[in-house]
Amino acid sequence: MFEMYQCVSSKFSGRIYLVRMEDVINDVPGESKRLAGFLNIEYQPAMVHFPQRMRNEKKRARYGNEVDKGQVGLWHDTETVYDGFFAGQAERLGPMFDRLDSVIHYFGCK
């Protein structure tokens, strides 16, 4: 998938906009303005109030009116992420993260 991203972004530079979840969560208004600018559309303040427009009531209740900044970086903690689904799997997951290390650094996630 990473190779596909690199190929597409090199062939269509200026037409690909990379959105990192961490950046959106940490700065919804800023990322919304940047994306609107990239898309050449007018920024609307309502763009940052997306939780209020969620149709799924459970998700809307979970998010309320704020973005859950606690989600940033959860993937680093394999023992507790996803309610401990990966607990005790550090030995098996380590090689996977090792292979992904260059991708993680490329996107500035470490």
Image (spheres, helix red, strand yellow):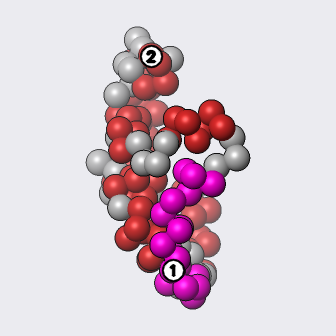
Question: Percent from the top left, x then y, of residue 14?
Answer: 53, 85
Give whichever of 17, 92 is nearer the camera. Answer: 17
Which element carries disc 1, helix, strand or loop?
A: loop
Q: Give the magenta-colored segment's residue range.
A: 35-53
The answer to whether any part of residue 101 appears in the image is no
1 and 32: which is toward the camera: 32
Q: Quadrant of residue 28?
A: bottom left
According to the picture, the residue beneath numbered tag 2 turns out to be 84
Tell me the chief SS of the magenta region.
helix
Q: Earlier in the sequence, mark 2 or mark 1?
A: 1
Q: CA distance from mark 2 to mark 1?
A: 39 Å
State the image quarter where residue 4 is shown: bottom right
The kind of residue on which mark 2 rests is Gly
Q: Report which residue position mark 1 lands on.
A: 43
Name the residue located 41 percent from the left edge and 42 percent from the top edge. 68
Of all residues, the one furthest to the left in this rendering is 110
At horizontal 43% and vertical 25% (from top left) the residue drawn is: 81
User: Is 42 colored magenta in this rendering?
Assistant: yes
Between residue 51 and residue 88, name the one nearer to us: 51
Name the amino acid, label 1: Tyr
Q: Position of residue 92 (x, y in %)?
A: 45, 20
Of the two numbered discs 2 and 1 in the rendering, the one whose residue sits closer to the viewer: 1
> Quick one: label 1, few (<14), some, or many (20+) residues within 10 Å?
some
Asked if residue 8 shows in the view, the reply is yes
Q: Horizontal and vertical percent for residue 110?
A: 29, 48
Q: Is residue 18 above or below residue 88?
A: below
Q: Secondary structure at mark 2?
A: helix
In the rendered image, residue 71 lying in the magenta stretch gets the answer no
